[in-house]
């Protein structure tokens, strides 16, 4: 069955946030004494929840994070986004030319999704159709977010295609009985494929699956 509705993840699919946000996390963790490289942070944290990230850093440190750690992290990432955030290459052409309805569904809070989409001039394509895990109180790999997004747009899972870049996102789509394209290259592509995704390495390849 051909898809009739598309759900985009945000970070790593619409906006190239992962390197910036994971780099800030790793740097702040190192400032506290944790042995955590930027590369390990990207490989470990991409597509996960803040609770997972903070628990991981606390275990690496062997102690609780300072109460203001999240505030510092958010402030620094937003500053870096404003200076350096870029859209994923090719995504503007994709959303401009799609003939199917689509939305964005992210583990991030809605204000962050909106902020980032505005920075890269994508907000107008999604402004009335943004879904956050914070709304449903369930984070990927839980399928609730994707199921809610599809149901809110009156599409069943069988007619929904998800575009993801993280293992947890692919797992959520598979658990929701939705087809999923994994946007990745190299080792990460192999991981997403092993979780059940059909892998694409360029955004324009989406049209090959519609």
Image (spheres, helix red, strand yellow):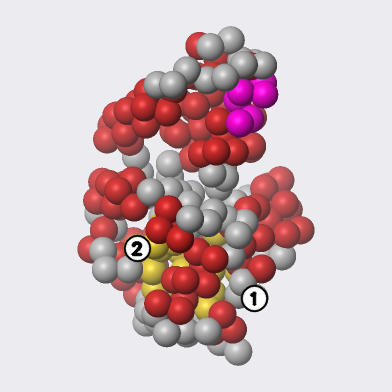
Q: Who's the residue at 59% across and 84% down the image?
A: 158
- Residue 58 sits inside the magenta stretch: yes
**Mark sitting earlier along the chain (2/1):** 2
Circle 2 residue = 130
User: In the rendering, at what x and y percent does residue 149 appear?
Assistant: 44, 71
Front in this rendered view, residue 147 or 201: 147
Crowdedness near tag 1: few (<14), some (14–19) or many (≥20) residues, C-alpha within 10 Å: some
Q: Measured along the vertical axis of the image, is residue 131 above or below residue 65?
A: below
Q: Give the prevailing secondary structure in the magenta stretch.
A: helix
On the question of residue 122 being in view, the answer is: yes
Single out the residue that lies furthest toward the bottom.
1
| Identity of the residue drawn at 55% across and 38% down | 51
* Quadrant containing the N terminus in the rendered view: bottom right
Q: Which residues are magenta?
A: 55-60
Residue 24, percent from left and from top: 45, 26
- Res 142 quadrant in image: bottom right
Q: Which label was assigned to residue 196?
A: none
Q: Are marks 2 and 1 in contact (CB under 8 Å)?
A: no
Residue found 40% across the figure and 21% down from its top: 68
For the residue labelled by badge 2, is the local secondary structure a helix, a strand or a loop? strand
Task: Give the x, y percent position of residue 10.
Answer: 43, 54
Q: Is residue 155 above or below residue 140?
A: below
Q: Is residue 118 magenta?
A: no
- Residue located beneath label 1 in the image: 177
Front position in the image: 124 or 187: 124
> Dot 1 lies on which element?
loop
Say whether residue 123 is left or right of residue 28: left
Determine which quarter of the picture holds residue 55.
top right
Distance from disc 2 to disc 1, alpha carbons, whole Å, reads: 21 Å
């Amino acid at each position: 069955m051909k898809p009739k509705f598309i759900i985009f993840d945000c970070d790593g699919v619409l906006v190239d946030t992962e390197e910036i946000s994971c780099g800030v996390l790793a740097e702040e963790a190192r400032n506290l004494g944790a042995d955590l490289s930027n590369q390990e942070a990207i490989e470990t944290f991409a597509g996960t929840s803040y609770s997972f990230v903070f628990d991981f850093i606390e275990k690496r440190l062997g102690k609780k994070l300072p109460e203001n750690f999240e505030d510092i992290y958010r402030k620094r990432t937003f500053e870096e986004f404003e200076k350096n955030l870029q859209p994923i290459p090719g995504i503007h052409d994709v959303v401009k030319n799609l003939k199917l309805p689509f939305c964005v569904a992210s583990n991030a809070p809605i204000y962050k999704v909106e902020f980032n989409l505005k920075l890269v001039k994508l907000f107008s394509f999604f402004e009335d159709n943004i879904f956050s895990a914070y709304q449903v109180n369930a984070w990927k790999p839980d399928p609730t977010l994707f199921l809610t997004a599809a149901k809110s747009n009156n599409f069943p899972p069988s007619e929904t295609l998800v575009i993801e870049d993280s293992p947890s996102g692919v797992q959520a789509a598979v658990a929701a009985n939705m087809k999923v394209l994994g946007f990745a290259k190299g080792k990460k592509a192999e991981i997403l494929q092993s979780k059940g995704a059909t892998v694409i390495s360029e955004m324009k390849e989406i049209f090959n699956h519609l």
